Image: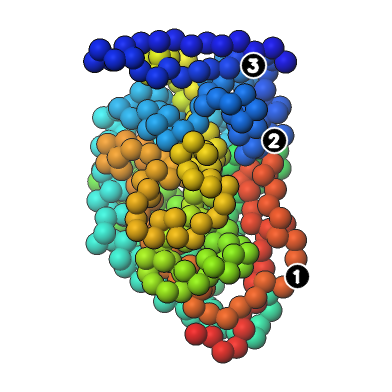
Amino acid sequence: MTEQHDVLRTTQHGSEVTPLRIRRLPGDATVSLWREGYTFGTRRFERFDTQAFRTRILGRSTLVMRGVDAVRFFYGEDRFDRGGVVPRSVLHSLQDEGSVQTLAGDDHHARKEVFLDLAFAPRSRQPLVRIFQELLAEEMDRAVGQHDHDVLKWLTRILTATALTWVGLPYDERSLRERAVEFDAMIDGAGSFGVRNARGRRYRRRTERWARQIVDDVADERWNNMVVAHILTHTGDRDVAMVELLNVVRPVVAVARFAAFAALALWTYPEARAVAAVSDAGARSVAQEVRRTAPFFPLIGGVATRELAWRGVRFSPGDRVIVDLFATNRDPRHWPAARSFDAQRFVDGRGEDDIVAQGAGSWSDGHRCPGEPATVDLLSAFVSELAARRWEAPHQDLGVSLSRLPARAGRPGIRIRMLDGNR
Protein backbone atom coordinates (compact mmCIF):
# COMPACT_ATOMS: atom_id res chain seq x y z
CA MET A 1 0.00 0.00 0.00
CA THR A 2 1.32 3.42 -0.92
CA GLU A 3 0.92 6.33 1.47
CA GLN A 4 1.74 10.02 1.22
CA HIS A 5 2.11 12.55 3.98
CA ASP A 6 -0.02 15.69 3.77
CA VAL A 7 1.22 18.06 6.48
CA LEU A 8 0.18 21.71 6.42
CA ARG A 9 1.62 24.13 8.97
CA THR A 10 -0.01 27.31 10.20
CA THR A 11 0.74 29.77 12.96
CA GLN A 12 -1.65 31.01 15.58
CA HIS A 13 -0.91 33.88 17.97
CA GLY A 14 2.74 33.70 16.98
CA SER A 15 3.28 30.06 17.86
CA GLU A 16 3.16 27.02 15.63
CA VAL A 17 0.05 24.87 15.89
CA THR A 18 0.71 21.14 16.05
CA PRO A 19 -0.17 20.02 12.52
CA LEU A 20 -2.50 17.12 11.88
CA ARG A 21 -0.51 14.45 10.06
CA ILE A 22 -2.70 12.93 7.37
CA ARG A 23 -2.13 9.64 5.60
CA ARG A 24 -3.43 9.28 2.07
CA LEU A 25 -4.74 5.81 1.30
CA PRO A 26 -5.35 4.73 -2.29
CA GLY A 27 -8.55 3.27 -3.67
CA ASP A 28 -12.16 3.43 -2.53
CA ALA A 29 -12.82 2.19 1.01
CA THR A 30 -16.62 2.00 0.89
CA VAL A 31 -16.78 -1.80 0.91
CA SER A 32 -14.17 -2.00 3.68
CA LEU A 33 -16.13 0.48 5.79
CA TRP A 34 -19.36 -1.52 5.68
CA ARG A 35 -17.54 -4.85 6.01
CA GLU A 36 -15.37 -3.84 8.98
CA GLY A 37 -17.94 -1.67 10.73
CA TYR A 38 -16.76 -0.11 13.95
CA THR A 39 -13.15 -1.24 13.50
CA PHE A 40 -12.68 0.42 10.10
CA GLY A 41 -11.15 3.64 11.41
CA THR A 42 -9.31 2.19 14.39
CA ARG A 43 -7.41 -0.31 12.25
CA ARG A 44 -6.07 2.45 10.04
CA PHE A 45 -5.40 4.97 12.80
CA GLU A 46 -3.32 2.40 14.64
CA ARG A 47 -1.67 0.83 11.61
CA PHE A 48 -0.37 4.18 10.39
CA ASP A 49 0.04 5.81 13.83
CA THR A 50 -2.10 8.78 12.88
CA GLN A 51 -5.22 10.62 13.95
CA ALA A 52 -6.43 11.23 10.39
CA PHE A 53 -6.33 9.65 6.96
CA ARG A 54 -7.77 10.50 3.59
CA THR A 55 -9.51 7.93 1.42
CA ARG A 56 -12.44 7.67 -0.94
CA ILE A 57 -15.92 6.83 0.38
CA LEU A 58 -18.70 6.33 -2.18
CA GLY A 59 -16.29 7.61 -4.79
CA ARG A 60 -15.66 10.93 -3.01
CA SER A 61 -12.46 12.08 -1.31
CA THR A 62 -13.11 11.98 2.43
CA LEU A 63 -11.02 12.92 5.45
CA VAL A 64 -11.51 10.48 8.34
CA MET A 65 -10.47 11.73 11.80
CA ARG A 66 -10.57 10.69 15.44
CA GLY A 67 -9.95 12.56 18.69
CA VAL A 68 -11.94 14.60 21.18
CA ASP A 69 -10.57 17.82 19.69
CA ALA A 70 -11.55 16.67 16.19
CA VAL A 71 -15.10 15.93 17.31
CA ARG A 72 -15.41 19.32 19.00
CA PHE A 73 -14.09 21.07 15.90
CA PHE A 74 -16.57 19.18 13.74
CA TYR A 75 -19.59 19.99 15.90
CA GLY A 76 -18.75 23.61 16.64
CA GLU A 77 -20.08 26.82 15.05
CA ASP A 78 -21.99 25.11 12.23
CA ARG A 79 -18.74 24.41 10.40
CA PHE A 80 -20.10 21.27 8.75
CA ASP A 81 -23.46 20.43 7.19
CA ARG A 82 -24.38 16.89 8.11
CA GLY A 83 -26.66 16.45 5.11
CA GLY A 84 -25.32 14.90 1.95
CA VAL A 85 -22.97 12.37 3.57
CA VAL A 86 -25.33 9.99 5.38
CA PRO A 87 -27.20 7.87 2.80
CA ARG A 88 -30.86 8.84 2.41
CA SER A 89 -31.98 5.32 3.34
CA VAL A 90 -30.28 5.63 6.74
CA LEU A 91 -31.60 9.16 7.24
CA HIS A 92 -35.19 8.12 6.56
CA SER A 93 -34.95 5.10 8.84
CA LEU A 94 -33.88 7.18 11.83
CA GLN A 95 -34.58 10.90 11.38
CA ASP A 96 -36.26 11.93 8.14
CA GLU A 97 -35.63 15.18 6.31
CA GLY A 98 -36.58 18.38 8.07
CA SER A 99 -35.94 17.04 11.58
CA VAL A 100 -33.86 19.02 14.04
CA GLN A 101 -30.79 16.82 13.43
CA THR A 102 -30.64 17.77 9.75
CA LEU A 103 -30.92 21.54 10.23
CA ALA A 104 -28.07 24.02 10.57
CA GLY A 105 -27.49 27.57 11.71
CA ASP A 106 -30.32 29.64 13.16
CA ASP A 107 -32.94 27.09 12.06
CA HIS A 108 -31.21 24.35 14.05
CA HIS A 109 -30.79 26.50 17.15
CA ALA A 110 -34.41 27.65 17.11
CA ARG A 111 -35.76 24.11 16.69
CA LYS A 112 -33.41 22.73 19.31
CA GLU A 113 -34.83 25.11 21.89
CA VAL A 114 -38.05 23.10 21.69
CA PHE A 115 -36.22 19.99 22.89
CA LEU A 116 -34.08 21.74 25.48
CA ASP A 117 -37.08 23.44 27.04
CA LEU A 118 -39.74 20.80 26.56
CA ALA A 119 -38.19 17.41 26.84
CA PHE A 120 -34.77 17.37 28.43
CA ALA A 121 -34.57 20.19 31.00
CA PRO A 122 -33.98 18.92 34.58
CA ARG A 123 -37.59 19.61 35.54
CA SER A 124 -38.68 17.29 32.70
CA ARG A 125 -36.01 14.63 33.18
CA GLN A 126 -36.90 14.01 36.81
CA PRO A 127 -40.44 12.78 36.04
CA LEU A 128 -39.03 10.74 33.13
CA VAL A 129 -36.55 8.93 35.36
CA ARG A 130 -39.14 8.43 38.11
CA ILE A 131 -41.59 6.81 35.67
CA PHE A 132 -38.81 4.55 34.36
CA GLN A 133 -37.69 3.52 37.84
CA GLU A 134 -41.22 2.56 38.82
CA LEU A 135 -41.91 0.57 35.66
CA LEU A 136 -38.49 -1.11 35.77
CA ALA A 137 -38.88 -2.19 39.40
CA GLU A 138 -42.36 -3.59 38.69
CA GLU A 139 -41.13 -5.54 35.67
CA MET A 140 -38.12 -6.94 37.52
CA ASP A 141 -40.28 -8.00 40.48
CA ARG A 142 -42.69 -9.71 38.09
CA ALA A 143 -39.83 -11.46 36.27
CA VAL A 144 -38.48 -13.30 39.33
CA GLY A 145 -38.68 -17.03 38.74
CA GLN A 146 -39.89 -16.60 35.17
CA HIS A 147 -38.16 -17.34 31.88
CA ASP A 148 -35.06 -15.55 30.60
CA HIS A 149 -35.45 -12.04 29.24
CA ASP A 150 -33.63 -10.61 26.24
CA VAL A 151 -32.43 -7.33 27.79
CA LEU A 152 -32.67 -5.33 24.58
CA LYS A 153 -36.24 -6.39 23.83
CA TRP A 154 -37.27 -6.19 27.46
CA LEU A 155 -35.90 -2.69 28.01
CA THR A 156 -37.21 -1.52 24.64
CA ARG A 157 -40.72 -2.35 25.84
CA ILE A 158 -40.21 -0.77 29.27
CA LEU A 159 -38.68 2.39 27.82
CA THR A 160 -41.42 2.67 25.21
CA ALA A 161 -43.99 2.59 28.02
CA THR A 162 -41.86 5.11 29.92
CA ALA A 163 -41.68 7.53 26.99
CA LEU A 164 -45.39 7.32 26.15
CA THR A 165 -46.38 7.85 29.78
CA TRP A 166 -43.95 10.77 30.11
CA VAL A 167 -45.28 12.54 27.02
CA GLY A 168 -48.87 11.82 28.02
CA LEU A 169 -49.79 9.49 25.16
CA PRO A 170 -52.27 6.70 26.00
CA TYR A 171 -51.55 3.08 25.11
CA ASP A 172 -52.84 -0.41 25.69
CA GLU A 173 -50.89 -3.66 25.58
CA ARG A 174 -51.31 -4.05 21.83
CA SER A 175 -50.28 -0.49 20.93
CA LEU A 176 -47.34 -0.69 23.35
CA ARG A 177 -46.13 -3.85 21.63
CA GLU A 178 -46.52 -2.24 18.20
CA ARG A 179 -44.67 0.95 19.15
CA ALA A 180 -41.84 -0.99 20.81
CA VAL A 181 -41.33 -3.14 17.70
CA GLU A 182 -41.44 -0.09 15.44
CA PHE A 183 -38.95 2.00 17.42
CA ASP A 184 -36.55 -0.92 17.74
CA ALA A 185 -36.74 -1.57 13.99
CA MET A 186 -35.99 2.08 13.22
CA ILE A 187 -32.92 2.08 15.45
CA ASP A 188 -31.75 -1.33 14.25
CA GLY A 189 -32.10 -0.26 10.61
CA ALA A 190 -29.92 2.82 10.99
CA GLY A 191 -26.41 2.27 9.70
CA SER A 192 -27.41 -0.73 7.62
CA PHE A 193 -28.51 -1.48 4.11
CA GLY A 194 -30.73 -4.21 2.74
CA VAL A 195 -33.36 -6.06 4.72
CA ARG A 196 -32.83 -4.43 8.12
CA ASN A 197 -32.89 -0.93 6.71
CA ALA A 198 -35.97 -1.66 4.60
CA ARG A 199 -37.69 -3.11 7.65
CA GLY A 200 -36.84 -0.03 9.71
CA ARG A 201 -38.20 2.31 7.04
CA ARG A 202 -41.36 0.23 6.68
CA TYR A 203 -42.02 0.33 10.42
CA ARG A 204 -41.21 4.03 10.51
CA ARG A 205 -43.99 4.71 8.01
CA ARG A 206 -46.40 2.84 10.29
CA THR A 207 -45.23 4.85 13.29
CA GLU A 208 -45.58 8.07 11.33
CA ARG A 209 -49.24 7.31 10.64
CA TRP A 210 -49.78 6.84 14.38
CA ALA A 211 -47.93 10.07 15.24
CA ARG A 212 -49.62 12.06 12.49
CA GLN A 213 -53.05 11.06 13.79
CA ILE A 214 -52.06 12.34 17.23
CA VAL A 215 -50.81 15.63 15.75
CA ASP A 216 -53.99 16.05 13.69
CA ASP A 217 -56.19 15.37 16.72
CA VAL A 218 -54.37 18.00 18.77
CA ALA A 219 -54.24 20.53 15.90
CA ASP A 220 -57.97 20.10 15.23
CA GLU A 221 -58.73 20.33 18.96
CA ARG A 222 -60.22 16.83 19.16
CA TRP A 223 -57.76 16.03 21.93
CA ASN A 224 -55.37 17.99 24.13
CA ASN A 225 -51.73 17.16 24.75
CA MET A 226 -49.36 19.85 26.02
CA VAL A 227 -46.23 18.30 24.49
CA VAL A 228 -47.73 17.94 21.01
CA ALA A 229 -49.28 21.41 21.22
CA HIS A 230 -45.89 22.87 22.17
CA ILE A 231 -44.20 21.20 19.21
CA LEU A 232 -46.93 22.40 16.86
CA THR A 233 -46.59 25.95 18.11
CA HIS A 234 -42.84 26.00 17.45
CA THR A 235 -42.86 24.17 14.12
CA GLY A 236 -46.08 25.47 12.58
CA ASP A 237 -46.29 22.41 10.36
CA ARG A 238 -48.08 19.13 11.04
CA ASP A 239 -45.64 16.94 9.10
CA VAL A 240 -42.65 18.44 10.88
CA ALA A 241 -44.43 18.20 14.23
CA MET A 242 -45.02 14.51 13.56
CA VAL A 243 -41.31 14.00 12.88
CA GLU A 244 -40.27 15.89 15.99
CA LEU A 245 -42.74 14.02 18.18
CA LEU A 246 -40.95 10.84 17.18
CA ASN A 247 -37.65 12.58 17.92
CA VAL A 248 -38.82 13.13 21.50
CA VAL A 249 -39.94 9.55 22.07
CA ARG A 250 -37.42 7.49 20.09
CA PRO A 251 -34.21 8.62 21.91
CA VAL A 252 -35.73 7.44 25.18
CA VAL A 253 -36.30 3.99 23.66
CA ALA A 254 -32.78 3.96 22.19
CA VAL A 255 -31.33 3.85 25.72
CA ALA A 256 -32.20 0.14 25.63
CA ARG A 257 -29.14 -0.34 23.42
CA PHE A 258 -26.88 1.03 26.13
CA ALA A 259 -28.80 -0.93 28.79
CA ALA A 260 -27.99 -4.22 27.06
CA PHE A 261 -24.28 -3.36 27.08
CA ALA A 262 -24.59 -2.30 30.73
CA ALA A 263 -26.00 -5.72 31.62
CA LEU A 264 -23.11 -7.32 29.72
CA ALA A 265 -20.59 -5.19 31.63
CA LEU A 266 -22.13 -5.94 35.02
CA TRP A 267 -22.03 -9.66 34.27
CA THR A 268 -18.53 -9.66 32.76
CA TYR A 269 -16.86 -7.40 35.33
CA PRO A 270 -17.90 -8.21 38.93
CA GLU A 271 -16.05 -5.10 40.13
CA ALA A 272 -18.41 -2.97 38.05
CA ARG A 273 -21.38 -4.48 39.83
CA ALA A 274 -19.75 -3.76 43.20
CA VAL A 275 -19.02 -0.13 42.27
CA ALA A 276 -22.55 0.42 40.95
CA ALA A 277 -24.16 -1.03 44.07
CA VAL A 278 -22.28 1.26 46.47
CA SER A 279 -23.66 4.67 45.51
CA ASP A 280 -25.42 6.74 42.87
CA ALA A 281 -22.01 8.13 41.88
CA GLY A 282 -20.76 4.59 41.35
CA ALA A 283 -23.77 3.66 39.21
CA ARG A 284 -23.30 6.81 37.15
CA SER A 285 -19.60 6.06 36.68
CA VAL A 286 -20.41 2.58 35.38
CA ALA A 287 -23.10 4.03 33.11
CA GLN A 288 -20.66 6.55 31.67
CA GLU A 289 -18.01 3.89 31.10
CA VAL A 290 -20.63 1.86 29.25
CA ARG A 291 -21.36 4.89 27.05
CA ARG A 292 -17.62 5.31 26.40
CA THR A 293 -16.89 1.69 25.50
CA ALA A 294 -20.12 0.39 23.96
CA PRO A 295 -20.37 0.39 20.17
CA PHE A 296 -23.23 2.80 19.60
CA PHE A 297 -23.40 5.19 16.64
CA PRO A 298 -20.02 4.61 14.96
CA LEU A 299 -19.32 7.85 13.11
CA ILE A 300 -20.67 11.17 11.93
CA GLY A 301 -20.13 12.78 8.55
CA GLY A 302 -20.55 16.21 7.03
CA VAL A 303 -19.43 18.66 4.37
CA ALA A 304 -17.61 21.92 5.10
CA THR A 305 -19.91 24.94 4.93
CA ARG A 306 -17.13 27.48 4.31
CA GLU A 307 -13.37 27.95 4.18
CA LEU A 308 -11.91 26.48 7.37
CA ALA A 309 -8.47 25.93 8.84
CA TRP A 310 -7.70 23.67 11.77
CA ARG A 311 -4.43 22.13 12.95
CA GLY A 312 -2.81 23.03 9.67
CA VAL A 313 -5.54 21.49 7.53
CA ARG A 314 -7.52 23.72 5.19
CA PHE A 315 -11.08 22.86 4.24
CA SER A 316 -12.95 24.25 1.25
CA PRO A 317 -16.75 24.43 1.03
CA GLY A 318 -18.06 20.98 0.13
CA ASP A 319 -15.07 19.03 1.48
CA ARG A 320 -16.27 15.79 3.04
CA VAL A 321 -15.28 14.77 6.57
CA ILE A 322 -16.05 11.74 8.74
CA VAL A 323 -15.32 11.76 12.46
CA ASP A 324 -14.99 8.31 14.01
CA LEU A 325 -16.89 8.47 17.31
CA PHE A 326 -16.19 4.86 18.29
CA ALA A 327 -12.43 5.26 17.76
CA THR A 328 -12.45 8.59 19.63
CA ASN A 329 -14.03 7.01 22.70
CA ARG A 330 -11.27 4.39 22.64
CA ASP A 331 -8.41 6.68 21.62
CA PRO A 332 -5.29 5.65 23.61
CA ARG A 333 -3.87 9.14 23.16
CA HIS A 334 -6.68 10.49 25.30
CA TRP A 335 -7.94 7.70 27.55
CA PRO A 336 -5.60 5.79 29.91
CA ALA A 337 -6.07 2.04 29.44
CA ALA A 338 -8.47 2.96 26.65
CA ARG A 339 -9.53 -0.61 25.84
CA SER A 340 -10.12 -1.63 29.45
CA PHE A 341 -13.44 -1.26 31.23
CA ASP A 342 -12.74 0.87 34.30
CA ALA A 343 -15.86 1.05 36.46
CA GLN A 344 -14.37 3.90 38.56
CA ARG A 345 -13.10 5.99 35.65
CA PHE A 346 -15.81 8.64 36.08
CA VAL A 347 -16.60 8.24 39.78
CA ASP A 348 -15.50 11.82 40.49
CA GLY A 349 -17.30 13.16 37.42
CA ARG A 350 -14.15 14.29 35.64
CA GLY A 351 -13.83 13.51 31.94
CA GLU A 352 -17.54 12.92 31.32
CA ASP A 353 -17.74 15.69 28.72
CA ASP A 354 -15.05 13.94 26.68
CA ILE A 355 -17.38 11.01 25.92
CA VAL A 356 -18.60 11.64 22.38
CA ALA A 357 -21.10 8.81 21.96
CA GLN A 358 -23.81 11.42 21.39
CA GLY A 359 -21.81 14.30 19.96
CA ALA A 360 -19.72 17.06 21.52
CA GLY A 361 -19.79 20.72 22.35
CA SER A 362 -22.72 22.67 23.76
CA TRP A 363 -26.21 21.20 24.07
CA SER A 364 -27.75 24.61 23.42
CA ASP A 365 -25.49 25.99 20.69
CA GLY A 366 -24.00 22.92 19.02
CA HIS A 367 -25.16 19.59 17.61
CA ARG A 368 -24.63 17.65 20.83
CA CYS A 369 -27.69 15.53 21.44
CA PRO A 370 -30.03 17.36 23.86
CA GLY A 371 -31.16 13.95 25.09
CA GLU A 372 -27.72 13.03 26.42
CA PRO A 373 -28.42 14.05 30.05
CA ALA A 374 -31.62 12.01 29.98
CA THR A 375 -29.69 9.06 28.54
CA VAL A 376 -27.18 9.23 31.39
CA ASP A 377 -29.94 9.51 34.01
CA LEU A 378 -31.93 6.58 32.61
CA LEU A 379 -28.89 4.37 32.12
CA SER A 380 -27.63 5.16 35.62
CA ALA A 381 -31.03 4.22 37.03
CA PHE A 382 -30.94 0.91 35.17
CA VAL A 383 -27.39 0.13 36.30
CA SER A 384 -28.28 0.93 39.92
CA GLU A 385 -31.39 -1.25 39.89
CA LEU A 386 -29.75 -4.21 38.17
CA ALA A 387 -26.67 -4.08 40.40
CA ALA A 388 -28.87 -4.24 43.50
CA ARG A 389 -30.69 -7.42 42.44
CA ARG A 390 -29.84 -11.10 42.12
CA TRP A 391 -29.77 -12.33 38.54
CA GLU A 392 -27.71 -14.40 36.16
CA ALA A 393 -26.92 -14.62 32.49
CA PRO A 394 -27.46 -18.28 31.51
CA HIS A 395 -24.94 -19.94 29.22
CA GLN A 396 -24.98 -18.11 25.87
CA ASP A 397 -22.72 -16.48 23.32
CA LEU A 398 -21.88 -13.07 24.79
CA GLY A 399 -19.59 -12.01 21.97
CA VAL A 400 -20.09 -8.67 20.24
CA SER A 401 -19.83 -8.40 16.47
CA LEU A 402 -18.20 -5.08 15.61
CA SER A 403 -19.00 -5.55 11.94
CA ARG A 404 -22.73 -5.26 12.67
CA LEU A 405 -24.15 -1.74 12.61
CA PRO A 406 -25.57 -1.07 15.12
CA ALA A 407 -23.87 -3.64 17.33
CA ARG A 408 -25.65 -5.82 19.84
CA ALA A 409 -24.53 -7.01 23.26
CA GLY A 410 -24.30 -10.77 22.76
CA ARG A 411 -25.25 -12.85 19.75
CA PRO A 412 -28.05 -12.20 19.06
CA GLY A 413 -28.57 -10.50 22.43
CA ILE A 414 -27.82 -10.92 26.13
CA ARG A 415 -30.45 -12.86 28.12
CA ILE A 416 -30.74 -12.59 31.88
CA ARG A 417 -32.80 -14.43 34.51
CA MET A 418 -34.03 -12.69 37.64
CA LEU A 419 -33.51 -14.78 40.80
CA ASP A 420 -35.26 -15.01 44.17
CA GLY A 421 -33.93 -13.13 47.16
CA ASN A 422 -33.45 -9.83 45.40
CA ARG A 423 -31.98 -6.87 47.19
Quarter of the rendering containing residue 257: bottom right
Disc 2 crowd, CA 10 A, few/some/many (<14, 14-19, 20+): some
What quarter of the picture does the N terminus occupy? Answer: top right
In the displayed structure image, the side of residue 198 where residue 71 appears, left or right = left
Q: Which amino acid type is shown beneath numbered disc 3?
A: Leu
Q: Nearer the viewer, residue 6 or 158?
A: 6
Residue 10 vs residue 170, the one in the foreground: 10
Residue 17 position in % (x across, y down): 35, 18
> Which residue does the numbered mark 3 point to in the structure image?
25
Residue type at numbered disc 1: His
Q: Earlier in the sequence, mark 3 or mark 2?
A: 3
Q: Is residue 128 left or right of residue 145?
A: left
Q: Residues within 10 Å of mark 1 (few under 14, many from 20)?
A: few
Return the mark for residue 36: 2
According to the picture, the residue beneath numbered tag 1 turns out to be: 395
Q: Position of residue 378 (x, y in %)?
A: 42, 63
Q: What residue is shown at x 52% (from left), y 10% (from top)?
A: 6
- The three-letter amino acid code for the residue at tag 2 is Glu
Q: Position of residue 103 (x, y in %)?
A: 37, 31
* Numbered badge on residue 218: none
Which residue does the image show at 58% across and 42% down from the upper left? 190
Residue 178: tell me if it is visible. no
Label 2 vs 1, first from the N-terminus: 2
- Going from N to C along the chain, the mark reached first, 3 or 1, is 3
Q: Nearer the viewer, residue 132 or 38?
A: 38
Q: Farthest residue toward the bottom?
A: 421
